[in-house]
Image (cartoon, grey):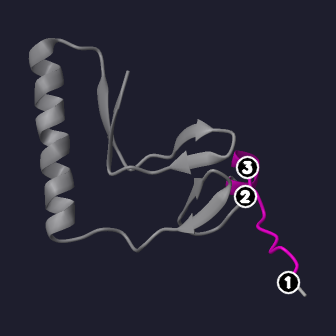
């Protein structure tokens, strides 16, 4: 006798927008985020953001460097990278 297939719910951005707490949504699967970064990780992310800003200014590019924003990739995927370059 085989076991019944396990049901894995598939969530969308609309579901995600109503959740409390820190989550990402990967191909419909909710991923709990770890606590805010600190220490070395935060220092590296800050340095990366600084270098990106500097490069944007030097190249006269019309872009922004944004830390930890929700990036809606598709209707079932939302990620929150440490740093994003947005134009």
Residues under labels 3 and 2: Cα distance?
11 Å
User: Mark 2 to mark 1: distance in Å?
Assistant: 33 Å
Q: Relative to 6, is 81 on the left or the right?
A: left
CA gap between label 1 and label 3 equals: 28 Å
Of labels 1 and 3, the one closer to you: 1
Residue at left offset 18%, top offset 22%: 56
Say what secondary structure mark 2 lies in.
loop
Q: Pick whichever of labels 2 and 1 is earlier in the sequence.
A: 1
- Image quadrant occupied by the N terminus: bottom right
Quadrant location, the C terminus: top left
Which residue is found at the position 72% from the left and 58% from the top? 18
Outermost residue to the top? 60
Q: Which secondary structure, mark 1? A: loop
- Is 16 placed left or right of 59 in the picture? right
Please state the extent of the stretch shown in magenta in the rendering: 4-16
Image spot of residue 47 (x, y percent): 12, 48
Q: Which residue is mark 1?
A: 3
Disc 2 target residue: 18
Q: Is residue 46 above or below residue 20?
A: above
- Across and down, in percent, residue 48 comes to 16, 45
Q: Are marks 1 and 3 in contact (CB under 8 Å)?
A: no
Q: Nearer the viewer, mark 3 or mark 2?
A: 3
Can you tell which of label 2 and label 1 is closer to the viewer? 1
Q: Nearer the viewer, residue 56 or 32?
A: 32
Which residue position holds label 3?
12
Determine the image quadrant of residue 38: bottom left
Magenta part mainly helix, strand or loop?
A: loop
């Amino acid at each position: 006798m085989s076991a019944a297939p396990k049901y894995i719910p598939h969530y969308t951005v609309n579901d995600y927008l109503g959740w409390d707490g820190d989550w990402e949504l990967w191909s419909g699967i909710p991923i709990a985020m770890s606590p805010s970064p600190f220490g070395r990780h935060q220092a590296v992310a800050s340095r990366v953001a600084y270098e990106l800003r500097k490069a944007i200014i030097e190249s006269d590019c019309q872009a922004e460097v944004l830390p930890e924003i929700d990036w809606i990739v598709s209707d079932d995927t939302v990620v929150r990278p440490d740093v994003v370059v947005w134009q």
